[in-house]
Image (cartoon, rainbow, N blue to C red):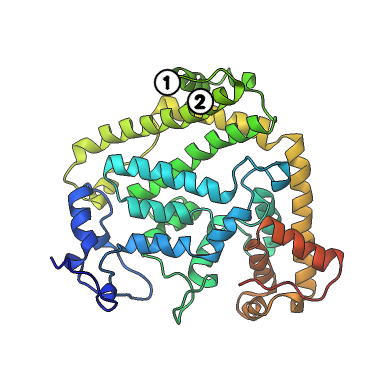
Amino acid sequence: MNTSLPTSQSNESCAWQNCLWAEREEKTLASYAMHSRDSAGRRYAEPLHRYRSPYQRDRDRVLHSAAFRRLSGKMQVFTGDMGDYHRTRLTHTHEVATIARTIARVLHLNEDLVEALALLHDIGHPPFGHSGEEALDECLSAHGGFSHNAFAMVLAEELETRYTPYPGLNLTREVLAGQDYRITHGEEGGALPPLLEVQLVDLCDSITYTAHDVDDALTLGLLRIEQLSGLELVRRALHWNSGPVGGDATARRKALVHSLIDVQVADVIDRSQSILEPLRGLDGLAVRQLGTTLDLSPPLASEKEQLSHFLFENVYRHPQLITIRERAKQRVRDLFDALVAQPQRLPPRFIDRAHSVGVPSSAAHYIAGMTDRFCDTVYNTIVESGHWQAPDWQ
Ligand code: MG
């Protein structure tokens, strides 16, 4: 293998056998992992890169996209005016990526693919979390509706631009199929479960947000720790932590959140290893054809379900959040109506886009790309002040 320093030309092209990542993957990945050499490629063909695998490049394209940066200004569950401790979409995304990579490394799955999938998974969220999504879905009810998972595909394939002559990030088919699975959950894709890496990211998303929503809700005073004591997963987590814990409430809260994640990650690893061990030597397709799924063990899956239900009843439907949500939904609806009534107020690229997708979808996509604060700014500019044109969005 040629390991001399790359030149600008040699960065751009190599047969996979000569790429530096191929040897690393051969040494470290399990047979059933998604090997980069087996990628189905991209819509617009590109030469392989010598030292960055196709999924590393996907990860970097998502990381450098405008939609990814905007996750820092998009609420997860709690809004910016509730304080500055709680998660945003961006920090949630990094937590998902980190936990998924930890498990992927233990299971010898493709960490680069896992990271690309994790960084991509929430980029389609509109401002104001699920309230913004519900509002846009109502606004587009006669035009196919709106979902953040589907909008992530629109961003990845159409709205994000690089230096290339074609639109979109030109991600690999595996990463796009992983995001597409979040839309269809396999209903349109046949009987095969998705790649193990796709399953892992989906699982880590829910492990992550249940744990950090507990942390945020306790910190914001929406929950008291005593309310959690009847939950089986919480009791299991409290017994799990064998390390020293400080005596104050903050330390106890942080120990609980740490253990909630750790106990679930350990369970996923143990269950997955026992399932995958007998399948060593099989490739990823054969493992999927056997119906292999990555999940929590049945007892923990049931306990996590109990925690999720508790959070739904006691946090996501908390009166303080419902008031904020209704206000956000109304703002998104009013802004949408104003832009549809006078589409000339849209920025030029969305006026152009309206010719191909229609004014309602183009207006909704403009709004969906906004951060919470920018949405408030545009709402104040257009709806409240009656200013003529919306600020630009690139
Ligand atoms: Mg998520």
Q: Which residue type carries mark 2?
A: Ala
Side (left or right) of 211 relative to 310: left
Q: Determine the secondary structure under disc 1.
A: loop
Q: Nearer the viewer, residue 266 or 131?
A: 266
Q: Quadrant of residue 314?
A: top right
274 relative to 86, above or below: above
**Residue reaching furthest left?**
1
Q: Which residue type carries mark 1?
A: Gly
Q: Dot 1, crowdedness within 10 Å: few (<14), some or many (≥20)? A: few
Distance from disc 1 to disc 2, alpha carbons, whole Å, reads 9 Å
State which quarter of the image contains the C terminus: bottom right
Judge whether residue 170 can be spotted in this image. yes
Q: Nearer the viewer, residue 91 or 143?
A: 91
Side (left or right) of 207 relative to 79: left
Judge whether residue 193 can be spotted in this image. no
Say which residue label 1 marks. 243
- The x, y position of residue 350, in whole percent, is 65, 75
Q: Between disc 1 and disc 2, whose residue precedes?
A: 1
- For the point 66% across and 43% down, which residue is it? 84
- The x, y position of residue 27, in whole percent, is 18, 50
**Mark 1 in CB contact with mark 2 (< 8 angstroms):** yes
**Label 2 CB, ligand 1: below 8 Å?**
no
Q: Dot 2, crowdedness within 10 Å: few (<14), some or many (≥20)? A: some
State which quarter of the image contains the N terminus: bottom left
- The x, y position of residue 114, in whole percent, is 37, 51
- The x, y position of residue 355, in whole percent, is 64, 81
197 relative to 23, above or below: above
Say which residue label 2 marks. 255
Q: Quadrant of residue 142?
A: bottom right
366 relative to 295, above or below: below
